[in-house]
Image (cartoon, rainbow, N blue to C red):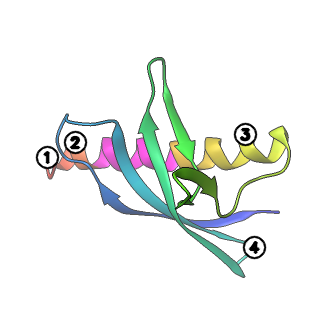
Amino acid sequence: MIITETKIRSINTTDEGRLKAIVSITIDNCLAIHDIKVIEGDDRLFVAMPSRKDNGIFRDIVHPIDEKTRNMLEDAILESYARYVMTAEAADIR
């Protein structure tokens, strides 16, 4: 499995709130996953997979089954987000 594309679809340009970005990825040029969130945690940024509220409980719509896959997805998404932020800061467009 290869992440063939990562798109930062929306970014929080203020310092308010923990949601930093909404991301879409494409896997193997054939499967797209939208509405992945980049969240600022207490110690680090992390990725929250797409979810919906069901009887007051948020349930993932899609998620990796094992830790290796989760780490691969999270690393690729956070790397893409970091590049986007650095590019935006360098261009002073934020």
Disc 3, SS = helix
* Label 1 environment density (alpha carbons within 10 Å; few <14, some 14–19, many ≥20): few
Which residue does the numbered mark 1 point to in the structure image?
A: 92
> How far apart are labels 2 and 4 at the CA level?
30 Å
Residue at the location (34% across, 44% down)? Answer: 20
Disc with the residue nearer the chain's start (4 vs 1): 4
Disc with the residue nearer the chain's start (3 vs 4): 4
Q: Nearest to the eye among marks 3 and 2: give it.
A: 3
77 shown above or below 40: below
- Farthest residue to the top: give it: 43
Which residue does the numbered mark 4 point to in the structure image?
A: 28
Residue 80 located within the stretch drawn in magenta: yes
Which residue does the numbered mark 2 point to in the structure image?
A: 89
Q: Nearest to the eye among marks 3 and 4: give it.
A: 3
Q: Is residue 72 left or right of residue 79?
A: right
Q: Are marks 3 and 4 in contact (CB under 8 Å)?
A: no
Residue at the location (55% across, 43% down)? Answer: 47
* Label 3 environment density (alpha carbons within 10 Å; few <14, some 14–19, many ≥20): few
Whole-percent x, y for residue 85 in the image = 32, 44
Bounds of the magenta segment: 79-87
> How far apart are labels 3 and 2 at the CA level?
26 Å
| Three-letter amino acid code at the position of disc 2 | Glu
Whole-percent x, y for residue 59 in the image = 63, 55
Q: Say the numbered circle drawn on residue 71.
A: 3
Whole-percent x, y for residue 89 in the image = 22, 42
